[in-house]
């Protein structure tokens, strides 16, 4: 008769195999993904109980540690698409500790990569970069046999840099990713690298080049049956068409993207598609439909505990409500998003929220509150030495100061704004000059 420990190990092994089967079906997409998802949903409680038991034994028994690492490896796609972020991180961290204890470098590499993915979803880009750099260090230790996987990590690292607007670093990573993918003739990785480069060229406003790269990537995903990759590429094409103000093509691409992500049960990408579709509807003049799409994205972000996407959905709703003249509602949304962004350290969104709060408060003639937000923005852009944004922000500061009765400050802000904007050849310099002229002609007491 087996001991209690042996019985627990067998129980854990059985449910680790069930998890592996679920993941295999889910990852294959098409008709198989629903089978995998159904199997996982049926056995979820037993799977989680078995994983938790192995995690409790990592420090004491190597066989349990190995099984704990396998639990994390067996649920790669499910962890990033179906698990709340905090739970996914917990699984991967204990799996990583187990792999390090056993000195299994390939498993260490895999767990670090997946942790990076979840941190990216959460908006903790600094931690994501640290994980991906850790992966590359392990790859160097493994040598040539790990070169194929190096390309995948370079793509992930490039995306993290792109999120931080470090475009040169992103391009370098993506170009190396494409070289490696073509060496090994990997369709999925080639299309991913092409898609990544397409997104970067879009950011650089090289729209024709971006479309060419993305259409090449789209063709590869369609030929290889990669539904997820096809959907993501359609989403990237939608963004290019959005920049070109082709609303019809933008909405069509985002709707296809959304349909595909729902088809394969990818909740995280469904949230992304809904967010993009919301902006497309708003740009086309359908703000009510835009709000509905953003609210749907917000629900998913909260279900997935994706704090970064939650903050962005709240900010987008704030912007839409502001455009409808519902400034109090906009302020409520912006503040809620700002609080989340401050917790997760998402500086990019904090700046966006502060800008929205300044504009919404100004619309309500709450000039003191508006000024505090614009002052914060000016200090941020001053540190970045961004003269254009400093000039634009000082224009708003001038309006607030004038309405608060401080004409001297208002004149000073308007004059500095005009000089800064003229220095960078920004046409808004004329607005600042006009404001300055009015302030000097009709000073408020």
Image (tube, helix red, strand yellow):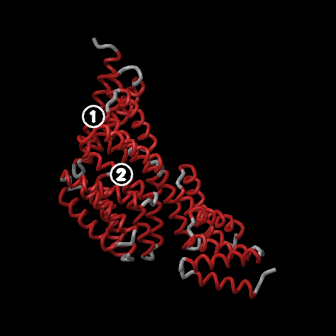
| Residue at x 35%, y 36% (from the top left corner) | 108
Read off the residue under disc 1.
18
Secondary structure beneath label 2:
helix
In this view, the residue farthest toward the right is 445
Give the total number of marks visible in the rendering: 2
Q: Quadrant of the C terminus?
A: bottom right
**Nearest-to-viewer mark from 1 and 2:** 2
Instruction: Name the side, left or right, on which 136 lies relative to 405.
Output: left
| Residue at x 41%, y 54% (from the top left corner) | 160
In this view, the residue farthest toward the bottom is 441
Up/down of 137 relative to 349, above or below: above
Image location (x, y in percent) of residue 415:
67, 79
Q: Of 222 and 38, which appears nearest the observer?
A: 222
Image location (x, y in percent) of residue 61:
36, 20
Please tell me the numbered disc located at residue 156.
Answer: 2
Q: Is residue 119 visible?
A: yes
| Residue at x 18%, y 56% (from the top left corner) | 224
* Label 1, residues with CA under 10 Å away: few <14, some 14-19, many ≥20: many
Q: Is residue 302 visible?
A: no
Q: Quadrant of the N terminus?
A: top left
Image location (x, y in percent) of residue 93:
42, 36
Instruction: Name the side, left or right, on which 7 lies relative to 59.
Output: left
Which quarter of the picture shows residue 433?
Answer: bottom right
Spatial CA distance of label 1 from label 2 is 29 Å
Up/down of 429 relative to 329, above or below: below
Closer to the N terminus: mark 1 or mark 2?
Answer: 1
| Residue at x 51%, y 56% (from the top left corner) | 311
């Amino acid at each position: 008769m087996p001991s209690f420990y042996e019985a627990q190990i067998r129980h854990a092994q059985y449910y680790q195999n069930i998890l592996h089967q679920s993941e295999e079906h889910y990852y294959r997409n098409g008709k198989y993904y629903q089978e995998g998802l159904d199997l996982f949903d049926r056995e979820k409680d037993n799977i989680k109980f078995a994983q938790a038991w192995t995690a409790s034994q990592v420090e004491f028994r190597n066989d349990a540690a190995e099984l704990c690492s396998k639990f994390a490896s067996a649920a790669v796609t499910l962890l990033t698409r179906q698990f709340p972020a905090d739970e996914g991180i917990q699984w991967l961290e204990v799996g990583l500790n187990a792999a390090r204890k056993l000195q299994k470098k390939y498993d260490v590499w895999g767990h670090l990569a997946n942790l990076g993915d979840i941190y990216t979803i959460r908006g903790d880009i600094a931690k994501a970069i640290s994980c991906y750099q850790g992966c590359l260090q392990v790859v160097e230790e493994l040598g040539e046999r790990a070169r194929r996987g190096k390309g995948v990590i370079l793509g992930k690292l490039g995306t993290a840099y792109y999120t931080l607007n470090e475009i040169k670093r992103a391009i370098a990573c993506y170009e190396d990713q494409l070289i490696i993918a073509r060496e090994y003739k990997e369709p999925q990785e080639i299309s991913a690298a092409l898609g990544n480069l397409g997104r970067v060229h879009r950011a650089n406003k090289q729209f024709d080049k971006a479309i060419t790269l993305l259409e090449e990537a789209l063709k590869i995903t369609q030929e290889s049956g990669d539904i997820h990759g096809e959907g993501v590429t359609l989403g990237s094409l939608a963004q290019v068409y959005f920049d070109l103000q082709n609303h019809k093509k933008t909405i069509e691409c985002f709707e296809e993207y959304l349909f595909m992500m729902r088809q394969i049960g990818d909740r995280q990408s469904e949230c992304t598609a809904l967010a993009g579709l919301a902006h497309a509807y708003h740009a086309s003049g359908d703000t009510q439909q835009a709000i509905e799409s953003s609210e749907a994205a917000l629900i998913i972000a909260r279900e997935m505990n994706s704090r970064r996407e939650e903050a962005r959905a709240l900010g987008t709703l704030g912007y839409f409500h502001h455009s409808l003249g519902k400034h109090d509602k906009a302020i409520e949304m912006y503040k809620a998003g700002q609080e989340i962004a401050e917790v997760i350290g998402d500086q990019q969104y904090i700046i966006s929220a502060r800008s929205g709060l300044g504009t919404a408060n100004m619309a309500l003639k709450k000039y003191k509150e508006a000024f505090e937000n614009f002052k914060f923005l000016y200090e941020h852009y001053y540190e970045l030495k961004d003269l254009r944004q400093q000039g634009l922000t000082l224009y708003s500061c001038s309006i607030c100061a004038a309405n608060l009765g401080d004409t001297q400050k208002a004149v000073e802000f308007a004059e500095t704004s005009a000089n800064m904007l003229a220095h960078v050849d920004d046409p808004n310099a004329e607005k600042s000059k006009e404001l300055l002229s009015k302030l000097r002609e009709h000073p408020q007491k």
